[in-house]
Amino acid sequence: MVLPLRLARARLAAATPASPVAAAAAAAARRSFAAAAARRSSAASAQADAGMATPNTASLTQPKGAPRPEPARNFQQTPSPSPLTSRSPTELDSSFVGMSGGEIFHEMMLRHQVKHVFGYPGGAILPVFDAIHNSKHFDFILPRREDGAGHMAEGYARVTGKPGVVLVTSGPGATNVITPMQDAMSDGTPLVVFCGQVATSAIGSDAFQEADVIGISRSCTKWNVMVKDINELPRRINEAFKIATSGRPGPVLVDLPKDVTAGILRNALPYSSTTPSLAALPSRAAARAPRARALRHSAQPAAQSASLPDDAVEITQAAKLINGAKRPVIYAGAGILSTPEGPQLLKELSERANIPVTTTLQGLGAFDELNPLSLHMLGMHGSAYANLAMQEADVIIALGARFDDRVTGRVDKFAPQARAAALEGRGGIIHFEIMPKNINKVVQATCALEGDVVRNLAKVLPHVNANKHPKWLGRIAEWKERFPFTYTPSDPAKGEFPKPQEVIEALDRAIEPRKEQTIISTGVGQHQMWACQHIRWRYPRSWVSSGGLGTMGFGVPSAVGAKVARPDATVVCIDGDASFSMTAMELATAHEFNVGVKILVLNNEFQGMVLQWQDLFYEQRYSGTRMTNPNFTKLAAAMGCHTIYCDAVADLPRAMKEFIEYDNSRPVLFECRVHTNEHCYPMIAAGKALHEMTLHPSLIKSDVEPITAPAS
């Protein structure tokens, strides 16, 4: 190992430019080589074998007082002066010369102001992990499995709006983050995933822990790339962050072969490659938006398109439809939460024109549900009055929502009155959407405003007139009175466990004084729907849940990520026993890193949502849905968590108070044994329209007037 280092020093001295910046960087590199030689030499066999050797477990435990490894040299430096935006893109940046690929990775995280990284080490990614050892610039969170890292990064991104960063090894490390990436793709969550890979010379040879992660991840990422040369590493990292946060946010993946991360950069690079603010989109990603815009405007007369801004026609048409509406409804999705101004503009539009607002599952918190104009969530388990309003509305204003099947129900029976109004030229569907492919994909839009939802709403709002809509709002008030979210309370005299809804309502009361500083995450199942129904959502970015993919096990790790991002907040994960069991071991992560998450497990000893379907449609044949659970409180206690248990309604206030008031810097688990055969209502069965709901048995279903589709 000594000879290559000497050769590297000689070549570096010969190639170093004479500029002061380059000279200083080269001098620092030369000084560091000698100090790092021993450390690099000790790691040489591990780098050569790419993780194939069996570790000596005895050597993993250092004796007391033994010297710890020195951190990589760039941790002793102040931030590099290279990311100055005043530099010419063609000028060369010498600050990376002499650095390894792993050290360049660390420097690029600093330039992108990354504060937290979630990941799991392995042989192929060790050069990067060695470079970030003891980093002073960001915190590293080690989960118990790679998918935990992905979901933690999702929770982090959802509450901050910044991309979550994941760092894993090759093979199973990379494949284990496929589910989080698809989850992020479905819900528009920005992730930047870095995974190790075997050396470029071994790619395609079925090497140990080799997997074609580029091919595997192609359909579940916005963009992916393998870095094949250390010279392109900074540029690819910049592109990854740019793409993850541009347009509709989403996941990207950067595949890092081991010889790239272990290699040494010899040449200065253009500032356009090394400076985040100068990064450009790769050609195949950048080519899509102009093409989509060109297709959209190709149908307009040439004279009209030449004399008006790109979106002037749509803005005028949207405002005209809103002003002429008799029964308007705003249907808001996650897109309205893309900037802090989004919820403010939504409130202004709603209150100026007296338009009721319903949100998707991922739009919860965009509109204060204590506002009388709130219709709460719509869809399969949404409010009856939101679903009826969508069917009766003559104008639907869709803000950053994609008309998911859980929202529309049977598509040919969706929004019949709006479609009838569109045919008559007096209404229809106005779709604000950033993704061209989502426009007219499910339902035909009367007016489509493609682009940033918040920016386009700000353009339309000045043209919207004040309005009252007294008859329409009166009708909605009647629906709210007749079809509330409801359930039959438990009967302690019969020895019944608490109903899940009672527990969630108790939680909502407990967090009310601090709701602005509270974040709720969930797993997937009935508990997720009851959380939507029985908590009053009031603030943006207070809700973290898996929507499009419906990933069980999402709750605990996403709560950990949210709490890492917002240590000042109260972060509560509402989980079911089945969903919790999938990622329960991440409580050990919370304990190790002092992440004070609060986990509420509603234990009915069943996969509740599947049980409900088996009750209603499969004659109570409970195939594979009964759970035999461990003692969750003992399991959590073994991982260092404070625990609380409750199985009686009378004890619920005491237990909930202890749960919420427990030390906000330490993890706590509250297990509540709940009623087993409780169903979640309203419910729209497969193949049914929004107005064809199954309501709670205590409500009179015949009160729902039939709503017909327009004549074809």
Image (spheres, rainbow, N blue to C red):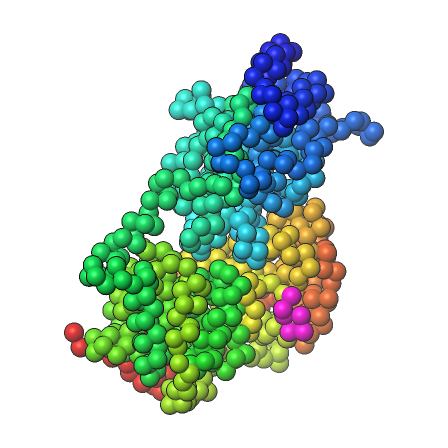
Task: Point out residue 221 in the picture as x, y percentages from the top left corner.
Answer: 41, 45
Task: Point out residue 334 in the picture as x, y percentages from the top left corner.
Answer: 46, 62
Say whether residue 167 is magenta: no
Q: Nearer the viewer, residue 232 or 573?
A: 232
Image quadrant occupied by the C terminus:
bottom left
**Seen from this angle, which residue lies furthest right?**
65
Residue found at x 62% / y 78%: 492
On the question of residue 46 being in view, the answer is no
Residue found at x 54% / y 37%: 87
Image quadrant occupied by the N terminus:
top right
To which quarter of the image does residue 117 belong? top right
Q: Is residue 672 left or right of residue 163?
A: right
Say whether residue 514 is magenta: yes
**Seen from this angle, which residue lies furthest top?**
3
Position above or below: 153 against 296: above
Report the number of numbered marks: 0
Q: Is residue 711 left or right of residue 141?
A: left
Residue found at x 57% / y 34%: 105
Task: Point out residue 57 in the picture as x, y percentages from the top left corner.
Answer: 68, 27
Q: Nearer the viewer, residue 112 or 367?
A: 112
To which quarter of the image does residue 33 belong? top right
Position above or below: 397 against 125: below
Q: Which residues are magenta?
A: 512-517
On the question of residue 495 being in view, the answer is yes
Residue found at x 48% / y 53%: 189
Task: Point out residue 520 in the picture as x, y percentages from the top left corner.
Answer: 58, 63
- Which secondary structure type mostly characterizes the magenta part of the structure? helix
Q: Is residue 93 left or right of residue 78?
A: left
Position above or below: 694 against 208: below
